[in-house]
Amino acid sequence: MNTFSLEIKTPDALVFSGDVESLIVPRPDGLEGYLANHEPVLVDLAHGTLEIKGSDIGIPETETPIFPITKDPSNKSIKIEITGGFLTFLNNKATIFIR
């Protein structure tokens, strides 16, 4: 499966950086998914769970009680609870800024 670059950032830290196969984000009107080569977007994120899938993703090094992170080895994914933010996708790179 094709991959794309993903970075997840807070004002204070880089939470995740790596190549992933898919991303599901919480939007104000429901969940939305992203795959490699998605069209350019800038979207708001709602309170909820980010789900990141890929064959070689590990648990991010930055883990705080504010953003609980869980790993599911059976489907090669991690989930990060967020309180909102926004996502940009441009040139096969997604960047998520969480607050």
Image (spheres, grey):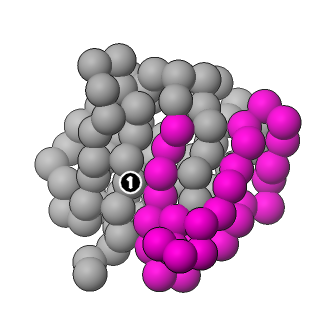
Residue 20 at x, y percent in the picture: 43, 69
Q: Name the side, left or right, on which 65 lies relative to 70.
A: right
* Three-letter amino acid code at the position of disc 1: Leu
Q: Is residue 48 above or below residue 95?
A: above
Question: Is 74 inside the magenta-drawn segment?
Answer: yes
Q: Residues within 10 Å of mark 1 (few under 14, many from 20)?
A: many
Residue 10 at x, y percent in the picture: 67, 35
- Looking at this view, is 57 or 75 the one in front? 75
Q: Residue furthest top?
A: 28
> Where, quadrant-wise, is the N terminus in this rendering?
bottom left
Q: Is residue 40 above or below residue 27?
A: below
Which quadrant of the structure image shows residue 37?
bottom left
Q: Which residue is mark 1?
A: 23
Q: Residue furthest right?
A: 65
Q: Name the side, left or right, on which 97 lies relative to 60.
A: left
Q: Residue at x 47, y 72 (%)?
A: 75
Residue 86 at x, y percent in the picture: 44, 28
Q: Residue at x 44, y 66 (%)?
A: 53
Q: Secondary structure at mark 1?
A: strand
> Where, quadrant-wise, is the C terminus in this rendering?
top right
User: Is any atom of residue 50 visible in this view?
Assistant: yes
Question: Is 50 inside the magenta-drawn segment?
Answer: yes
User: Is any atom of residue 18 visible in this view?
Assistant: no
